Image (cartoon, rainbow, N blue to C red):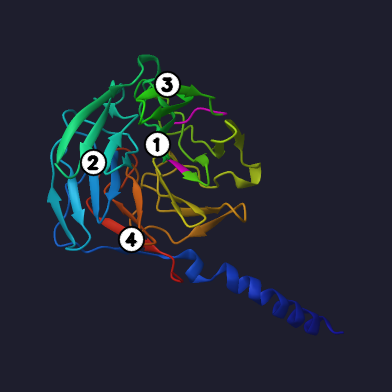
Amino acid sequence: MKLQQIIIICCLFLQPELTFSQDSSLQGKWETINTVNTPEARHENSFVRVKHKFYLLGGRGIKPVSIYNTRTNTWSKGAKPPIEIHHFQAVMYKGNVYVFGAMTGKYPYETPLSNILIYNPKNNIWTEGVEIPKERRRGSAGVVIQKNKAYIVSGIVDGHNSKHVPWLDVYDFKTEQWTVLKDAPRSRDHFHAAIIKGEIYAAGGRNSSYATKQTFHLTIPEVDVYNIKTGNWYTLPLKNNIKTQRAGASCVVLGGDLIFIGGESFLQKHAHSEVDAYNIKNKAWRKLTNLNRGRHGSQAIVYKNSIYIVAGSGNRGGKPELDSMEKFTFLDH
């Protein structure tokens, strides 16, 4: 058989795989939502869904809650929190928004909150919840909900200075009690946690170290996973390290994928626009379509099989603060 014939046959066999890897339906699409009005720009904020409304909370300075109504495509203004809150992953529990693991104050020596903060969307009021144990207070932590418990993962004790921790704590909403669980394999801050099938994923982030002039440098490639049932941690294999390391990314679950969105790093001035997906069945990462606008320091939510992200900073650090919102959808959904 001639060499030319062999090459043609090989190309025919390889074509389906090439088509699969380039299939735009697997990469998805981002679109910028043209809303009637805009929320107050901010970064290091959180973003949570309650029913058909989205709540944009916190950020540097004392910002009022911005409320997006999916039915009218409009933003309205809610109550201001009692203090400045930033660097937190808010969670929704029984219709209320809970703030664990937040910071207050100015860079680089921010302090963690002493109490849980609770926002009631129905009544548009903030209240102070139970005290957080003094020896376990930190900010920039990952937080997830499983049944009637909140799990608070890692974080940093002293703002951006140096005391990043591998702690894991669980708060029981029913008993209002805290329990210390097994430390993660490594410390990390400036990240979001996610939960899939009873396992908590800690992906991305960094060890902020203003003390050594490495605030943005010490990013973390490893992905650590906590199995709630067994109470043990494990780390994904080396091949599943995050390729484009970054902190300040958003992390959500859509179907069987862990979606890792945006972020910041010392490698570039502009916020990252990369979006990656880890499939728990295939145990592999793949690239998704980039954000239209790179951003970090925000939070993403899932609503009707789409991902929404809003606000954040467009460059490494705190400026420019953004007010735009984007929506991601897999094209085959």
Residue identified by numbered label 2: 57
Labels 2 and 4: the sequence-earlier one: 2
Question: Residue visible at 20% across and 63% down?
Answer: 71
- The amino acid sitting under disc 4 is Lys
Question: Residue visible at 47% across and 22% down?
Answer: 180
Labels 4 and 3: the sequence-earlier one: 3
Labels 1 and 3: the sequence-earlier one: 1
SS label for mark 4: strand
Labels 2 and 1: the sequence-earlier one: 2
Q: Nearer the viewer, mark 1 or mark 3?
A: 1
**Front residue of this view, candidates 88 and 274:** 88
How would you classify the magenta stretch by its main secondary structure? loop
- The amino acid sitting under disc 1 is Asn
Residue identified by numbered label 3: 162
Labels 4 and 1: the sequence-earlier one: 1
| Marks 4/1: CA–CA distance | 29 Å
Count of marks, rendered view: 4
Q: How crowded is mark 2: few (under 14 residues within 10 Å), some or many (20 or more)?
A: many
Q: What stretch is highlighted in magenta?
A: 185-194
Residue 327 marker: 4
Q: Which of marks 4 and 3 is in front?
A: 4
Labels 3 and 2: the sequence-earlier one: 2
| Marks 2/1: CA–CA distance | 23 Å
